[in-house]
Image (tube, rainbow, N blue to C red):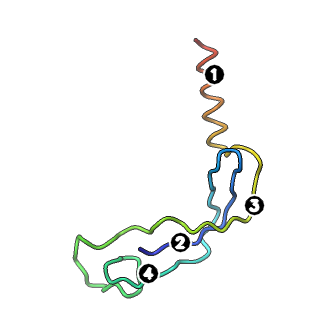
């Protein structure tokens, strides 16, 4: 399965990785992977892998906080608790 090398931020408090951009693609060189250069262009097999594997994380920044999604969820939970 081919993988993308992604540059991004690691949020240290929650451990999430936020991808900013894909900087490279690692080719698995498999004829069964649709993302690979060696996959036949005329292939009609439904057994071939269609998606990329997990990103290879290239951490370019570390932030000692929760990611924005986790912060939002925390605020939403606090608001719901205040309404109760």
Which of the marked residues, 3 or 4, is nearer the chain's N terminus?
A: 4
How far is mark 3 from mark 4, CA to CA? 28 Å
Name the side, left or right, on which 27 lies relative to 11. left
How far is mark 4 from mark 2, CA to CA? 11 Å
SS under mark 1:
helix
Q: Mark number for residue 28?
A: 4
Which of the marked residues, 4 or 2, is nearer the chain's N terminus?
A: 2
Query: Mark 4 near mark 1, Cβ–Cβ under 8 Å?
Result: no
Question: Residue at point 69% right, 43% down?
Answer: 66
Name the residue furthest top: 84
Residue designated by label 2: 4
SS under mark 4:
loop
Query: Mark 4 near mark 2, Cβ–Cβ under 8 Å?
Result: no
Query: Mark 3 near mark 2, Cβ–Cβ under 8 Å?
Result: no
Which of the marked residues, 3 or 2, is nearer the chain's N terminus?
A: 2
How far is mark 1 from mark 2, CA to CA? 38 Å
Which of the marked residues, 4 or 1, is nearer the chain's N terminus?
A: 4
Query: Mark 3 near mark 4, Cβ–Cβ under 8 Å?
Result: no
How far is mark 3 from mark 2, CA to CA? 18 Å
Taking 44 as reference, is 70 above or below it? above
Instruction: Mark 3 vs mark 1: give the one in front.
Output: 3
How far is mark 3 from mark 1, CA to CA? 31 Å
Tell me the quarter of the picture where residue 1 sits.
bottom left
Residue 80 placement (x, y as % from top left): 58, 20
Q: Mark number for residue 79?
A: 1
Residue designated by label 3: 61
Mark 4 crowdedness (10 Å alpha carbons): few <14, some 14-19, many ≥20: some
SS under mark 3:
strand
Name the side, left or right, on which 55 lies relative to 30. right
Q: Mark number for residue 69?
A: none
Tell me the quarter of the picture where residue 70 sits.
top right
């Amino acid at each position: 399965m081919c993988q993308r090398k992604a540059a991004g931020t690691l949020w240290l408090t929650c451990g999430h990785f936020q991808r900013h951009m894909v900087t490279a693609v690692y080719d698995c060189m498999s004829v069964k992977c649709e993302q690979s250069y060696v996959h036949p262009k005329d292939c009609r097999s439904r057994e071939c892998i269609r998606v990329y594997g997990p990103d290879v994380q290239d951490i370019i920044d570390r932030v000692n906080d929760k990611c924005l999604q986790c912060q939002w969820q925390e605020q939403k939970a606090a608001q719901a608790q205040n309404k109760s």
